[in-house]
Structures are given as structure tokens and as C-alpha cells.
Image: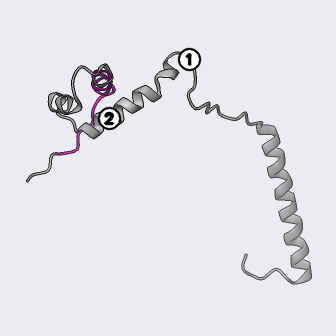
Amino acid sequence: MTRRPRRNHTPAFKAKVALAAVKGEKTLAELAQQFDVHANQITAWKAQLVGGAAEVFGGSATGTAAPVVDVKVLHAKIGELALENDFLSGALGKAGLLGARR
């Protein structure tokens, strides 16, 4: 039995197959034979279509909004930590506790 090379399907093809599965006019086996795709793949595309349908109308199904990042606050924190590192390395060096590993 020879293996078929990996196929990459276009989003338009996936949508066409998933919509046919959602309609329910044919069984999964019939759709798999018609489109030459495994039935499990059709089921996955159908679930993806149904799960993402709310996003089409402007809603967010998962609510994954990126958190707002204040760059100035982050730069200030980096400055504080760099200052602490310099201070501590100097203090440890004077105490003789900082090895020659650096």
C-alpha cells in the first residue's frame, strides 16, 4: 500500500465540505467519498465551523482579547531590576561572596 503525499486544503474547500456536512443532506461516508477526505477530517472541520460561527457576526466565542500593556511601566520595572542587580553584585563582590564565575 503506497502512502499518499500530504495534502493542504484551501480554506474555501474546507468551508465547502463543512457546510455540506452541516446541511446533513448526505452521510459522512458519502461526503468523504465525494470530496476524497477522511470522515474524521470532515467532522473536525464541521466542529470548527460551528464553533467559530459566532465570530462571523462580530462576537468573540472565547473572549481572548489581548491585555493592554503599558510599555513605560515595563521599562521602569526593567530599570529597577537592573539597578538592583548592579547593587547586589557590587555588594556581594565587596563581601567576597561573588565568585569568579562572571
Relative height, residue 23 to residue 81 (above, below):
above
Q: Residue at x 27, y 32 (%)?
A: 9
Q: Who comes first in sequence, dot 2 or dot 1?
A: 2
Residue 16 rendering spot, x and y as whole percentages: 28, 22
> How was this image coloured?
one colour
Q: Residue at x 65, y 34 (%)?
A: 66
Residue 58 rendering spot, x and y as whole percentages: 56, 17
Q: What residue is shown with label 2?
A: 43
Amino acid under disc 1: Gly
Q: In this view, which residue lies farthest toward the top? A: 57
What is the span of residues highlighted in magenta in the rendered image? 5-20
Q: Residue at x 51, y 21 (%)?
A: 54
Give the dominant element type of the magenta stretch: helix, strand or loop: helix
Q: In this view, which residue lies farthest toward the left? A: 1
Q: Is residue 52 left or right of residue 95?
A: left
Q: Is residue 102 left or right of residue 64?
A: right
Q: What residue is shown with label 1?
A: 58
Secondary structure at badge 2 equals: helix
Between 69 and 27, the residue placed more toward the observer is 27
Between 13 and 27, the residue placed more toward the observer is 27
Q: Is residue 23 left or right of residue 88?
A: left
Camera-side mark, 2 or 1: 2
